[in-house]
Amino acid sequence: MPRGPESGPADSPRGRVRLARGVSPWLAPTAAAAAVTAVLTRRSPRWALAAAPLAALTGGMLWFFRDPERAPGEGRLISPADGVVQSIDPWPDGRTRVAIFMSPLNVHVNRAPADGTITSVEHVPGGFVPAFNKDSDKNERVVWHFETALGDIEMVQIAGAVARRIVPYLFAGAKVVQGERVGLIRFGSRVDLYLPEGIAPAVTVGTRTIAGVTRLDHV
């Protein structure tokens, strides 16, 4: 029986969690500063004023940059992002845009919505308004196109007010398997997926999605 839009395990049976690729520029200096101040605290308790928040920040970043293994879901198109469906909009060319808002509490590794070949990965400069704002369509973003059995599939990673770095893991010409990791957005953001003409969404506004698991196309 096909899984519903929110069903399916979030992680693999082994429950393995690793850190996302591309986090070193953020995590390494913070963790190093936390370690140094922790050592200095032994010499003077005053260093605890710096050590405590740095340790908390390091722990928060470890949580934010987690990258759990996922048992893949079923469907022609599955969610590229963890988050909440913010809007579902018909597009003039017959496609349907499903916008998924990613809060800082979500996993921020994005995954391929279908099997296929990446035909283009384009970085588009822009602003950094909050990702839930309607003007976020003009934000810094990376536009992906996948050639799939359903034809061309467009996915857009959009940076938010805090997320100012999108890290692609793959580039044009690479073949991908549905649910494979394709990139990372650092700190809060949005991911849009355009369903081809004739494909109805299996989710509604407010649906919580799991990258690589939640089915987006209606059976």
Image (cartoon, rainbow, N blue to C red):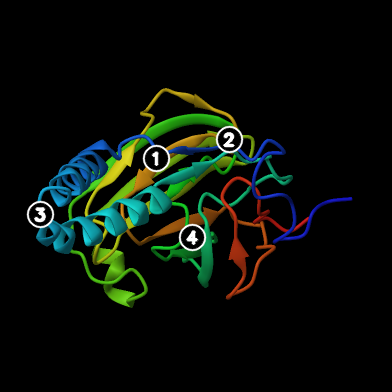
Q: Earlier in the sequence, mark 3 or mark 4?
A: 3
Q: Earlier in the sequence, mark 2 or mark 1?
A: 2
Picture quadrant of residue 217: bottom right
> Label 1 belongs to which residue?
183
- Residue 161 image point, x, y percent: 24, 67
Q: Which mark is residue 99?
A: none
Pointer 3 local density, CA inside 10 Å: few below 14, some 14–19, many at least 20: few
What's the amino acid at mark 4? Asp
What's the amino acid at mark 1? Gly
Q: Write the residue at 48% across / 42% down.
A: 67
> Label 3 belongs to which residue?
44
Task: For the residues labelled 3 and 4, say whether their Cβ atoms are less than 8 Å apart.
Answer: no
> Label 4 belongs to which residue?
93
- Residue 40 image point, x, y percent: 12, 47
Q: Earlier in the sequence, mark 4 or mark 1?
A: 4
Q: Earlier in the sequence, mark 3 or mark 1?
A: 3
Q: Which mark is residue 148?
A: 2
Looking at the image, is 134 positioned above or below residue 157?
Answer: below
Q: Residue furthest right?
A: 1
Left/right of residue 98 with respect to residue 5 in the rendered view: left
Left/right of residue 219 with respect to residue 14 in the rendered view: right
Cα distance in 3D space between marks 3 and 4? 65 Å
Left/right of residue 203 with respect to residue 28 in the rendered view: right
Cα distance in 3D space between marks 3 and 1? 42 Å
Pointer 1 local density, CA inside 10 Å: few below 14, some 14–19, many at least 20: many
- Residue 142 image point, x, y percent: 31, 47
Task: For the residues labelled 4 and 2, say whether their Cβ atoms are less than 8 Å apart.
Answer: no
Task: For the residues labelled 4 and 1, say whether their Cβ atoms are less than 8 Å apart.
Answer: no
Cα distance in 3D space between marks 4 and 2? 18 Å
Tag 2, which secondary structure?
A: strand
What's the amino acid at mark 2? Thr
